C-alpha cells in the first residue's frame, strides 16, 4: 500500500486533499525498529509524527522516582498514528514510544504538515477527530481505574489483546501487561491465576486460550 493511502486511512489525514497528501507522503521515511528500540522519550523536543506500518509500539510513562514500574498508556498497532501532540502545541513529548516487537513505522516531519495546514484549514477537522478519539480513550481508562478492580482491568486487557480470538499469543510481557493494567506484576499474575482456576482461561507461557469469554466479559464490565 502506498504511503498516501496509509495516511488517508488515519483520522488525522482523513480530510486532507489527495494532492496535499501525496506531497506530505513523498517526504515521509520508513524506520525499522527492533524490540526495545525507543523512538522518543518523555521530554524530548518533537519534530515528527508516526504511523505504524507493522508491529506494535507502546506509549508509556515512567513512574520513577515513585517506583520502578512503567505505565503503558496505549498500544499503537498497524495503521495507528501517534506523536501528533507536539505539532499542535510545540511542547515536549509527554510520553515515551518504544517498540515491543520488531516494527516498521512511517515518519512524517512536522514541517510539511504545518505548511499545508495553513493553506488547507479543512485538515484541522481530521486533527479534531483524532483528539476527540484520544479524549474518549482517556475517559475510558479513567473510568476503568475508578470502577474496575485489578482483576476486572486484567480481564479487560486480556480481551483487548486477544483481538477477538479465543487462542492468541500475548503480544506483551507480563511486566508490560501489568503496566497496561496499572498494577504490580504480582497482582496481575494473581488475577490470571484466578481465571485459570475458575476454568475461564488456559495459559502456557505467553500462549492463552479463552474458554469462557462471556465470564471474562462480565468480569471486565
Image (cartoon, rainbow, N blue to C red):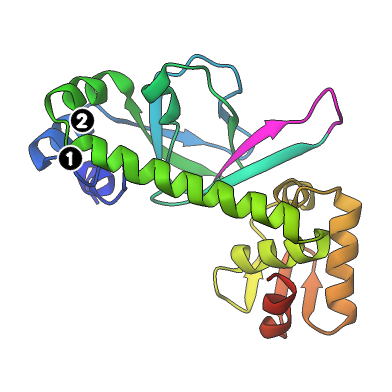
The quadrant of the picture occupied by the C terminus is bottom right
Task: Tell me the residue at 84%/57% (across/down).
Answer: 188
Q: Is residue 6 left or right of residue 55?
A: left
Provide residue 7's location: percent of width, then percent of height. Answer: 27, 43
Task: Tell me the residue at 50%/43% (across/down).
Answer: 103
Q: Is residue 64 left or right of residue 52?
A: right
Q: Residues within 10 Å of mark 1 (few under 14, many from 20)?
A: many
The answer to if 23 sits in the magenta stretch is: no
Q: Is residue 138 left or right of residue 170?
A: left
The answer to if 62 sits in the magenta stretch is: yes
Q: Residues within 10 Å of mark 2 (few under 14, many from 20)?
A: many
Q: Quadrant of residue 31?
A: top left
Q: Which residues are magenta?
A: 56-68
Which of the two labelled residues, at mark 1 and mark 2, occupies the earlier sequence position? 1
Q: Which residue is mark 2?
A: 24
Are dots 1 and 2 in contact, CB under 8 Å?
yes
Task: Tell me the residue at 45%/19% (across/down).
Answer: 46
User: Could one spot residue 194 in this view of the protein?
Assistant: yes
* Helix, strand or loop under label 1: loop
Q: Quadrant of residue 218?
A: bottom right
Q: Is residue 157 left or right of residue 108?
A: right
Task: Tell me the residue at 67%/32% (across/down).
Answer: 61
Q: Quadrant of residue 202?
A: bottom right
- As measured in the structure, the alpha-carbon distance from the residue carrying label 1 to the one carrying label 2 is 10 Å
Q: Which residue is mark 1?
A: 16
Amino acid at each position: 500500500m502506498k504511503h498516501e493511502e496509509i495516511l488517508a486511512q488515519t483520522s488525522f489525514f482523513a480530510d486532507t486533499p489527495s494532492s496535499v497528501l501525496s506531497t506530505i507522503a513523498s517526504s515521509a521515511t520508513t524506520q525499522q525498529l527492533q524490540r526495545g528500540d525507543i523512538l522518543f522519550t518523555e521530554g524530548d523536543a518533537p519534530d515528527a509524527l508516526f504511523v505504524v506500518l507493522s508491529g506494535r509500539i507502546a506509549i508509556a510513562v515512567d513512574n520513577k522516582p515513585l517506583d520502578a514500574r512503567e505505565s503503558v498508556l496505549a498500544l499503537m498497532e498497524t495503521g495507528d498514528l501517534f506523536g501528533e501532540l507536539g505539532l499542535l502545541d510545540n511542547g515536549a513529548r509527554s510520553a515515551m514510544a518504544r517498540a515491543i516487537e520488531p516494527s516498521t513505522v512511517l515518519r512524517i516531519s512536522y514541517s510539511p504538515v504545518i505548511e499545508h495546514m495553513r493553506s488547507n484549514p479543512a485538515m484541522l477537522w481530521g486533527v479534531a477527530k483524532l483528539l476527540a478519539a484520544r479524549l474518549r480513550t482517556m475517559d475510558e481508562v479513567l473510568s476503568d481505574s475508578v470502577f474496575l478492580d485489578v482483576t476486572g482491568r486484567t480481564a479487560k486487557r486480556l480481551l483487548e489483546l486477544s483481538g477477538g480470538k479465543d487462542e492468541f499469543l500475548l503480544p506483551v510481557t507480563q511486566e508490560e501487561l501489568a503496566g497496561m493494567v496499572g498494577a504490580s506484576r504480582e497482582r496481575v499474575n494473581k488475577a490470571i491465576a484466578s481465571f485459570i482456576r475458575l476454568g475461564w482461561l488456559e495459559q502456557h507461557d505467553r500462549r492463552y486460550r479463552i474458554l469462557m469469554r462471556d465470564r471474562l466479559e462480565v468480569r471486565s464490565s
